[in-house]
Amino acid sequence: MEQLLGAHTSIAGGVSTAIDRANILGFNAIQIFTKNNNQWNAKPLTDIEINNFKSKLTKSNIKIIIAHSAYLINLASKWKLILRKSREALVDELTRCEQLGIPYLNFHPGSHGGKGEEEGIKLIAEAINICHEKTKAFKVKSMLETTAGQGSSIGYKFEHLRKIIELVEDKNRVAVCIDTSHIFVAGYDIRTKESYNKVMKEFDKIVGLDLLKCIHMNDSKKDFATRVDRHEHIGRGYIGIEGFRNIMNDKRLLKIPKILETPKGKEQMEDLENIKVLKGLFIR
Ligand code: ZN
Ligand code: MN
Ligand code: MN
């Protein structure tokens, strides 16, 4: 079986150009931003852009596209204005995904900015509920990403995601993404077979493997449990190659899209090298 492998891919020149790039690079799974990821506002997608995207996608080898939200969004912000803008932006991004037929919008849960994790978790779930309410008939799911735990960010413990999901009313609209570099620096050791199995068992018990719909495949420039988020090429960081061998050969994860968010230049040639490394680990 061919695994779903690819990378976060640029949309410079319009959303549909990501599909051109993915075809050239040979990806069958990608992640994209649906708008400039450093701005609050974006022009709505035009019918031409939407149709272009969909027709290119049908003709491509891409089996799945995940969207990643803009980094500005903070559903747990202590600032009223930011909180409001974040909720509006999430609705906008869910709308873009729905228009493009993208099944998952991945985002970081949020940072509480000193209010505490309990309060932050409540705010995040409240925001998700509001956004789901405003996009009621939509198919796109909200995908919560595990985080590195920098600053006051929430999501560095599997329990955080569980608590958020428990408070989300429409459970059919939530999914989860594991970022390997994030969980590693957050204190989940995936380097040896034994520690990896222990981490996945814990994830399954607390969050549930049935909710896992994407894995961000990143090695880490920072050491175990440092809670600092710096991605590194596969096998060249503190996780190391064995950690990725564990994931690539986990039978339960064969159908889960595995997406690189490792350092890259404009042409994304580094992604090809990292994909090659990952493919080489998989024992058919
Ligand atoms: Zn992310
Ligand atoms: Mn990630
Ligand atoms: Mn990261």
Image (cartoon, helix red, strand yellow):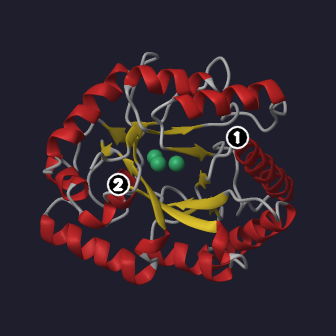
Observer-nearest of 166 and 219:
166
Circle 2 residue? 180
Residue 125 visible to an observer of this rendering: yes
User: Which x, y percent locates residue 208?
Assistant: 44, 77
Observer-nearest of 172 and 37:
172
Observer-nearest of 67 and 202:
67
- Outermost residue to the front: 59
User: Which x, y percent locates residue 92?
Assistant: 80, 47
Residue kind at label 2, given as amino acid type:
Thr
The residue that appears at 38% across and 75% down in the rendered structure is: 203
- Vertical relation: 198 (above or below) 228: below
- Label annotation for residue 198: none
Q: Of helix, strand and loop, which one carries label 2?
A: helix
- Label annotation for residue 100: 1
Neighbours of disc 1 within 10 Å: few (<14), some (14-19), many (20+): many
Q: Is residue 29 left or right of residue 193?
A: right
- Vertical relation: 34 (above or below) 112: above
Would you identify the image quadrant in which residue 56 lies?
top right
Mark 1 or mark 2, whichever is nearer to me: 1
Q: CA distance from mark 1 to mark 2?
A: 27 Å
The residue that appears at 84% across and 52% down in the rendered structure is: 88
User: Which x, y percent locates residue 180?
Assistant: 35, 54
The residue that appears at 73% across and 71% down in the rendered structure is: 123
User: Which x, y percent locates residue 83?
Assistant: 80, 57
The number of numbered badges drawn on the structure is 2
Residue kind at label 1, given as amino acid type:
Leu
